[in-house]
Image (cartoon, rainbow, N blue to C red):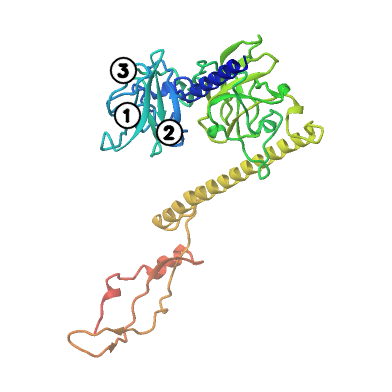
């Protein structure tokens, strides 16, 4: 009897070990799978490029509406949701249980197979494929799967708004989100009442979050806010909140829209995530990586969920003071900018009004802004410059002193003499005599 029991245990252990090594049983569902279809063209500036240079090396299964087969022809640049698509340069296995090593190519700008390497591919019982993928050698490159265009993960509602779908739930192989999940990082800082402090706190940024199922460890702080928090709340610049209602029935799992709060809008960006209410009264969330830096998911709507004193209760007074300080700094900066702009405008207006007046006064012969004639001056009859020397000429190489006096001259400079004095002094002046030498 003992021998039979020992044999039974040994066989069960062998079967368990074989399941662990069997890629048709032990695999991972790849993320962002619908975006990897050949028909999906990357929209630069709207959606970030997929990049498998950080992919974990392991077996993956593809569960996509676009299909699970890797394309066997070069898709084209910017297809498959990435800059440089990775495709299969060969054929897929045809027999159940067959495992092959296939060559995959990274499509470059000038070559369809810029660089290549091998991966494992197996056709499993149930007629589905699994791939033993390795990380890519280049950034902004990703594996392609499926040939149809699946655009449900990206729809534009207005110029600055995008909508995404949640990652695949991966229900194959007994996966249960209420059990198979991770605890969210920095959960004590994600409460709505927690205000980010410049220079003291590290900003939460879920653009580096691994997409998947998450739970907040403290059940009373596991609810996402359903109204838009303020900027700098939830320990981040741009809080992500739930635009809808949480599930109310145990076991209920549904897709819900989340929004990102920014300076200009409560819902500048939006996408869908999965939410499930588990037995025990806690929620799990199928979170997507955010597309915007300095943004983070919010969890916890009560004061007790925020980072605070030793008893776990947030000091509301400190929170309000921090918020008031931030608003005061913003107000001071705004006023300073307004004053600077006003000074610049005044300087430009002064230059614009004064400069033409100077030119106009000169052209009209000395009229001021109020229309009065400026007084001019003329030298007196006996007032003349000292004798001058004539320059070297052809007839004489030595300078010659001219005893003659030049006639009176008039200038346009202002003085206290009257216009009548100017006319009396200058009326008998022969303009040609000023330049005539008698000797």
Q: Residues within 10 Å of mark 2 (few under 14, many from 20)?
A: many
- The location of residue 143, given as percent across then percent down, is 38, 29
**Rendered residue at 49%/49% (across/down):** 353
Q: Find disc 2 in the rendering and name its residue.
A: 52
- In the picture, which quadrant includes the C terminus? bottom left
> Quick check: 87 left or right of 221?
left
> Quick check: 340 left or right of 39?
right
> Quick check: 394 left or right of 415?
left
- The location of residue 141, given as percent across then percent down, is 38, 34
**Rendered residue at 33%/19% (across/down):** 147
Q: Find disc 3 in the rendering and name its residue.
A: 94
**Rendered residue at 69%/28% (across/down):** 191
- In the picture, which quadrant includes the N terminus? top right
- The location of residue 388, given as percent across then percent down, is 33, 84
The secondary structure type at the circle numbered 3 is loop
Disc 2 or disc 1, which is closer to the eye? 1
The secondary structure type at the circle numbered 2 is helix
- The location of residue 203, given as percent across then percent down, is 62, 38
| Earlier sequence position, callout 3 versus callout 1 | 3
Q: Residues within 10 Å of mark 3 (few under 14, many from 20)?
A: few
Q: Find disc 1 in the rendering and name its residue.
A: 102
| Pick the front one: 26 or 389 | 26
């Amino acid at each position: 009897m003992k021998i039979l029991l020992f044999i039974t245990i040994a066989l069960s252990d062998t079967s368990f070990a074989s399941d662990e090594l069997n890629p048709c049983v032990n695999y991972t569902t790849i993320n962002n799978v619908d975006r990897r279809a050949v028909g999906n063209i990357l929209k630069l500036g709207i959606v970030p490029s997929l990049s498998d240079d950080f992919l974990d090396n392991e077996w993956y299964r593809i569960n996509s509406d676009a299909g699970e087969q890797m394309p066997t022809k070069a898709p084209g640049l910017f297809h498959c949701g990435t800059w440089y698509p990775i495709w299969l340069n060969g054929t897929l296995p045809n027999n159940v249980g067959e495992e092959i090593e296939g060559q995959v190519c990274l499509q470059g700008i000038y070559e369809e197979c810029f660089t290549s390497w091998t991966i494992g591919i197996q056709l499993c019982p149930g007629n589905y494929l699994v791939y033993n993928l390795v990380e890519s050698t280049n950034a902004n490159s990703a594996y392609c799967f499926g040939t149809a265009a699946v655009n449900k993960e990206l729809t534009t509602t207005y110029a600055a708004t995008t909508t995404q779908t949640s990652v695949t739930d991966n229900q194959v192989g007994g996966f249960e989100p209420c059990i198979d999940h991770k605890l969210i990082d920095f959960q004590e800082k994600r409460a709505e009442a927690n205000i980010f402090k410049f220079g003291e706190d590290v900003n939460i940024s879920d653009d580096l979050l691994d997409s998947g199922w998450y739970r907040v460890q403290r059940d009373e702080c596991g609810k996402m806010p359903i109204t838009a928090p303020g900027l700098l709340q939830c320990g981040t610049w741009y809080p992500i909140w739930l635009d809808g209602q949480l599930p109310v029935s145990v076991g209920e799992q549904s897709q819900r829209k989340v929004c990102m709060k920014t300076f200009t809008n409560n819902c500048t960006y939006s996408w869908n995530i999965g939410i499930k209410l588990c037995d025990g009264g806690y929620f799990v969330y199928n979170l997507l990586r955010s597309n915007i830096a300095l943004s983070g998911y919010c969890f916890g709507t009560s004061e007790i969920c925020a980072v605070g004193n030793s008893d776990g209760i947030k000091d509301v007074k400190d929170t309000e003071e921090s918020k008031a300080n931030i608003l005061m700094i913003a107000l001071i900066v705004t006023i300073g900018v307004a004053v600077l702009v006003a000074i610049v405008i005044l300087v430009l207006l002064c230059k614009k009004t004064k400069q033409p007046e100077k030119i106009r006064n000169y052209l009209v012969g000395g009229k001021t802004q109020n229309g009065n004639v400026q007084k001019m001056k003329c030298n007196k009859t006996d007032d003349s410059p000292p004798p001058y020397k004539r320059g070297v000429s052809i007839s004489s190489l030595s300078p010659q002193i001219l005893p003659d006096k030049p006639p009176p001259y008039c200038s346009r400079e202002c003085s206290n003499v009257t216009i009548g004095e100017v006319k009396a002094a200058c009326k008998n002046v022969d303009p040609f005599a000023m330049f005539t030498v008698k000797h």
